[in-house]
Each structure stands twice: as structure tokens, then as C-alpha cells.
């Protein structure tokens, strides 16, 4: 079972509008709501490809009730820690005329010390039956800045993946994750180094097993103890890139769970990431495309 | 007492972001939530200037619960008809770098026949103790297209104000409102006539007592049985124009309640409208500016 941990999960709301024009009034043509947050998206992709997964999150207030209902409706196994604050919302505005995707992310409710401890306890109680531990997304206000180091420390010998940014990433490195998966911008922000391979080596020096850098349409760059690989999609794709990074994390976790080698890890990550670009919402994957793309991903030494 | 009727009320959410840029991710810096919808804004302005008012609306689902709490917190007297659907949200994005105001309006929950009848009954039960009846905003899905004609027909001899647009306005004219308050665009849409005085005369011919056209920074144009007036702010203003039209309606209703003449009606409407531009959110007015502007509004025959 792959355990995904999302301390700052969200109710994802998607608005479809004709065209997003700042400083005007828009009529929302379609509204979709679903349980979200990066680790929830990872669990959704894992569930879609038939892998056993369990999502740990938090839920509070009216948005938390709706989040809980949507998680159940999606048939996603989840353990939700109740909190006093209101679960945050993220609003995605899809503009149909130009396919622009504009996101508005609320910062999230503040957790108190007791709530954070309950969240850590929930992960502690479940990680013993997990094959891989995945920690995803921002830390909520009130969580300790090294919250991810604490959570990663609970994993007793199983592979771990950390996908976050900024201070949460820097402080999380102390938890010695097996893999971190920044994008190029997050990697630069964490290291101050513009050259990805050099920056990744810097993180490996800080105790990370491997650094897998997502490069958008250019695929994934893996810097590992046994060398560097680049994996590229077989062809350019257009679609909704929101959630493509979460799908890559799902692919990484899948291969880590089965003990795959690095070329297999990056191949599966890129194939699932491409399949997510073709899915309508974050966490959706086009399964046919996934199976077609998996053997077609170009994996090579850079 | 001024009775405001809002069949499609909303939970208004305001997001503050640094700068709205389509096709990017935004961190929401501040979130404010309040009970909204055009008639609720009218009631809020009336309440702020010390006038007796009562707002009739609907409430359903989690957003409806929050709407109800926010209405109580604002100390606004309200009669809310419960509905099975979820109260809609409107999201306003304030971009601090350029003061752009971008709105996303959900269409609203569908009312069934029984719910619409309960709404009409609520208005029928309250209109007897009202001095003015104000009908504001869109009709929700499921309401009859001539819903406003039905509601206006409940007013037994008291002045009535209709502030809506499109088909709801055209079909609402059969209720013979004392005043309609379209903006220039809504007036053109309703009549197909580009010249405001000609278009207003056309609506008067359709049974409307007077047409008060809001012209943004140019103030208000009133076409009445006793002539035409234009009222202009004493000076140009910059601020948040969302809700300025609702504040104008509050001014119109106030003067109609006290039997004011048309020049007084347009003067008060423009003064409150200007005060609303200086208020931070729709329904807020700068009371000092209102009192300063009231004698300064320039009212003249065009």
C-alpha cells in the first residue's frame, strides 16, 4: 500500500468561463468540486491505475464536510484528521477560448499543536503497513516548518517521496527522503543554483537519495546515486498540466513500491504525467494514453 | 420599512491577490466572506444609513449556512426561505498592483415549483408592512421568467423598484414597477435602442413609472412622467465600483419611502453610489463621503 500524506488538503473547485478577462464580470458556465491537494491527487492517480493506496489528510468546517463527501464519492480510501479550522479551497478557472488555466490557492486553516500532533499520530499508525510513504504539498499555517522531516522520520526503512517547495522542502531534507521531486523553479529556489544537475547534486549532498526534477513538456531529469537519466515524452502534448507533477509522483511511488530501477521509475513517472495532461482535472489520467506512452517514453543519459 | 427581495442571493467571497495574471497560479493573501446578492447589498446600505429594512432571500446547503451566519453577524434583518440546492457563491478577485476587480458569478441553485411558491409567499406575508418594495438581481434557475412581475404584483399601492437585466427585466415590466434602474448596457439590451432617453421612454411606454439609468462615473439619468434629470457626482472618484448600482437603488428606495421629488431621488442615489465606490466591499458605504456629497451632487435638466 502507498501511503500519501497531505497536511494541507483542499476542496478543489473548477470554474469554466468563456474567456478570463481581468477587471470584468464572468458568468461561471460549469462548476466542478472534488477532494484535492497534491497528495490526494497522487492517491487518485494510484487508485485509477489499480494500485492500493491510502490518503491521510485533514478536514474541517463546511468545506471539510464537502471534501469528505467528495473523497468517499471518488471511492478513495482516506484517513481524515478533524480540525477546527475550515478546509481551504483552491479555485481553478478554465478559460475555454484560449485554454488558460488560472489558479487561486487559499493559504489553508491554521492547525494548533494538538491538531498537528493528531495528524502525525495518524501517519504513525498507518505507515507500518505502507510500502512507500509520499508527502505532498504545502504545510498548513501552524505546522512546524520541519513538519515533513518529522513525518518522513516515521518511515522505518521504506522508500519515501517528498514533493513540496520553499522552506518546507529545505527543512524537510533533514528527514532524508529517498526522492524529492521539485520542478526546475522549486529546485532553483531551494538551492540557489541555476544548473539543474548541479542543484540536484547539492540536494543529494544534503541527505536526499535521488532528485527527480520535473521539466514540464521536457519530461523528467533524475539525479541518483547510480547516475543521471532524462526521460522525455514520445510526443508534445497539449492539455491541462495541473496535476501532471502529482501524476509523476504517483509513477515514482509505484516503481519504488515494486523495487524498479531508476530508468523504470522515470519512464513510469513521465508516462503517468503525460496521461494526466490529457485528463480533464488534476488527478485524472487518460489510462489508454498511459499504456501507449509507457513503452514510448524516451529514457537516456543526458 | 423597505423590503428588499433577492431571489438569487449569494455568498460573496473576496480574494486579494498581488496581481491577477491569467494562466498562472495565485496565492490568495486575504479572504473575506459575506452575505451578498444585489438586494442584500441594498439592505446593507439602507441599514448603514439607519433606515429600517428587511431582506428576503433563500438559503441552502453549506454555503447557505454560511450566508445565514454572515447575515446575522452583519445584524441585517432577513427572512430566508430554505431551499434544497446550494446557495451560489460569487468570487471577487482584487488585484492589489493595478486595482483590477474581477468577478466570477455562479449561476445559482435551481428552485423547484414548491420553493418558488414559498419564496413568493414569504414576500406576500411581509409586503403589507413595507413602504417600498425593491426587487434585485437575477432570477435563479427554475424561477418563472416573469417571476418579478409576480412579485411586483404583490405590492398594493406602494412604490416598487426593479433592478435586473435581460429576460428577467423584459418580463418583469408586466409588474408595472414604479422605477427600473438599468445601466446603459442593460437598457440597450432590453430595448435595442442606443440613445438612453429614447430607450427609457420606450420602457415608460411599457408601463414603467420612471427609468433611472446608472451611467457609472457620469451619475444617473432619470426619465420620469414629469421630465428628465441628470445627476452627476461633484468630482471624479476612484475605488471599487462593485455595488455602486445597489447603493443607488438604496438611495432611490429611501427617497421613494419619504415621498421625495425626482431631483431628490437622483441626488440621494448618486450620493450613496459615490459613497459605495469608496467602501471596501459591495454594500459598504463611506458615510462621511455620503453626507458631504449629498448637497454637492449636480442635478440638472440635460
Image (tube, coloured by chain):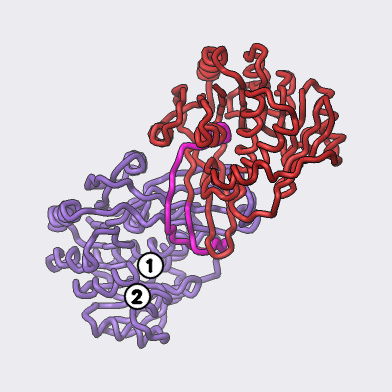
Chain colours: A red, B purple
The residue positioned 37% from the left and 81% from the top of the image is: B229
Residue B28 location (% of width, % of height): 57, 44
- Residue B270 sits above or below residue A162 on the image: below
The residue positioned 53% from the left and 29% from the top of the image is: A51
Q: Which mark is residue A134?
A: none
Is residue B298 found left or right of A216 in the rendered image? left
Q: Which residue is mark 2?
A: B212
Q: Which residue is mark 1?
A: B269
* Mark 2–mark 1 distance (CA, rounded to whole Å): 10 Å
Residue B99 visible? The answer is: yes
Q: Earlier in the sequence, mark 2 or mark 1?
A: 2
Residue B185 location (% of width, % of height): 43, 75
Quadrant for the C terminus of chain B in the image: bottom left
- Residue B178 sits above or below residue A134 on the image: below
The residue positioned 55% from the left and 69% from the top of the image is: B236
Disc 2 crowd rating (10 Å Cα; few below 14, some 14-19, many 20+) is many
When asked about the image quadrant of residue B135, the answer is bottom left
* CB within 8 Å, label 2 to label 1: yes
Residue B49 visible? The answer is: no
Residue A273 location (% of width, % of height): 63, 42
Q: Nearer the viewer, residue B297 or A110?
A: A110
Residue A33 location (% of width, % of height): 44, 44
- Residue A91 sits above or below residue B263 on the image: above
When asked about the image quadrant of residue B273, the answer is bottom left
The residue positioned 52% from the left and 12% from the top of the image is: A125
Q: Nearer the viewer, residue A24 or A100?
A: A100
Mark toward the viewer: 2 or 1: 2
Q: Which residue range is magenta in the image? A: A15-41
Mark 1 falls on what kind of element? helix
Is residue B31 found left or right of A262 in the rendered image? left
Amino acid at each position: 500500500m502507498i501511503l500519501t500524506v497531505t497536511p494541507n488538503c483542499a476542496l478543489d473547485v473548477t470554474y469554466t468561463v468563456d474567456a478570463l478577462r481581468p477587471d470584468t464580470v464572468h458568468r461561471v458556465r460549469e462548476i466542478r468540486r472534488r477532494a484535492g491537494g497534491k497528495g490526494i491527487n497522487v492517491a487518485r492517480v494510484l487508485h485509477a491505475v489499480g494500485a492500493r493506496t491510502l490518503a491521510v489528510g485533514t478536514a474541517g468546517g463546511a468545506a471539510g464536510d464537502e471534501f469528505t463527501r467528495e473523497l468517499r464519492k471518488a471511492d478513495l480510501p482516506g484517513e481524515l484528521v478533524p480540525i477546527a479550522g475550515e478546509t481551504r479551497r483552491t479555485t481553478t478557472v478554465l478559460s475555454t477560448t484560449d485554454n488558460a488555466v488560472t489558479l487561486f490557492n487559499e493559504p489553508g486553516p491554521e492547525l494548533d499543536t494538538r491538531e498537528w500532533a493528531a495528524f502525525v499520530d495518524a501517519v504513525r499508525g498507518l505507515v507500518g503497513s505502507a510500502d512507500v510513504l509520499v508527502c505532498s504539498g504545502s504545510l498548513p499555517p501552524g505546522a512546524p516548518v520541519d513538519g515533513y522531516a518529522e513525518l518522513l522520520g516515521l518511515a522505518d526503512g521504506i522508500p519515501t517521496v517528498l514533493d513540496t517547495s520553499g522552506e518546507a522542502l529545505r527543512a524537510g531534507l533533514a528527514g532524508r527522503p529517498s526522492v524529492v521531486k521539485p520542478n526546475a523553479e522549486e529546485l532553483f529556489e531551494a538551492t540557489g543554483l541555476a544548473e539543474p544537475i548541479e542543484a540536484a547534486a547539492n540536494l543529494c549532498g544534503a541527505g536526499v537519495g535521488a532528485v527527480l526534477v520535473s521539466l514540464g513538456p521536457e519530461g523528467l531529469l533524475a539525479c541518483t546515486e547510480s547516475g543521471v537519466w532524462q526521460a522525455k515524452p514520445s510526443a508534445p502534448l497539449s492539455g491541462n498540466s495541473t496535476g501532471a507533477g502529482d501524476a509523476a509522483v504517483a509513477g515514482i511511488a509505484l516503481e519504488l513500491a515494486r523495487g524498479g530501477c531508476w530508468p523504470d521509475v522515470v519512464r513510469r513517472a513521465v508516462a503517468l504525467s503525460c496521461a494526466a495532461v490529457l485528463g480533464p482535472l488534476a488527478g485524472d489520467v487518460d489510462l489508454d494514453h498511459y499504456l501507449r506512452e509507457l513503452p514510448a517514453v524516451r529514457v537516456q543519459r543526458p
